[in-house]
Image (cartoon, rainbow, N blue to C red):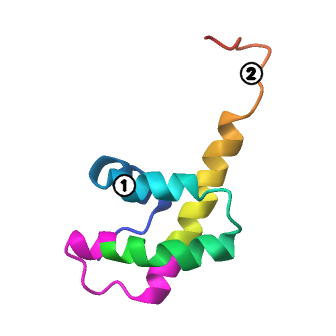
Amino acid sequence: MPNFEPARLFYDLAATNRTTFSVILDDRHLPIDDFIVIHRRSIREHYIRKGYIEVDGERASQAAANLWGYIHYLQAWAEQPPRPDRPHKR
C-alpha cells in the first residue's frame, strides 16, 4: 500500500521524478480543483511506477488535493517574515 502522506509524496517526486515535480510546482497557483484534474493522473502513474497497482483515480485525486495543500503550506511558511528573535540570514 503506498504512503499517501503529502510530505512523502512531495520529497519522493523531487528525488525520483524531477519532470513531474517541476510541472507540479509550476501549477501550484492553480485552484485546487484544476490542480487535482491535471495532476491526479501523473500522481497515479508515479505510484504505479513504484509498483503500487491498486492506486485508483479517487486515491490519486485525494493525494493530489493533499499535495496541493502541502505545497501551499510550505509556500506560506517560506513567505513569513523573520521573527524578531531570529534575524533572517542571507
Nearer to us in this view, 81 or 41: 41
List x then y, in percent, for residue 53. 24, 84
Vertical relation: 53 (above or below) 27: below
Instruction: Give the SS element for disc 1.
Output: helix
Query: Which residue position is annotated with label 2?
Result: 82
Q: Quadrant of residue 87?
A: top right
How dense is the environment of label 1, judged by Cα within 10 Å: few (below 14), some, or many (20 and up)?
few
Q: Quadrant of the N terminus?
A: bottom left
Q: Quadrant of the C terminus?
A: top right
58 within the magenta span:
yes
> Which numbered disc, 1 or 2, marks the residue that appears first in the sequence?
1
Name the front one of labels 1 and 2: 1
Q: In the shown orientation, is residue 88 left or right of residue 16? A: right
Q: CA distance from mark 1 to mark 2?
A: 32 Å
Q: In the shown orientation, is residue 67 left or right of residue 73? A: left
Report the disc number at residue 19: 1
- Identity of the residue drawn at 37% across and 49% down: 14
List x then y, in percent, for residue 11. 39, 49
Vertical relation: 86 (above or below) 5: above
Tell me the amino acid under the disc marked 2.
Answer: Pro
Q: How many marks?
A: 2
List x then y, in percent, for residue 50. 22, 69
List x then y, in percent, for residue 17. 31, 55
Q: In the shown orientation, is residue 22 left or right of residue 29? A: left
Range of residues picked out in magenta: 46-62
Marks 1/2 in contact by CB < 8 Å: the verdict is no
Q: Is residue 11 visible?
A: yes
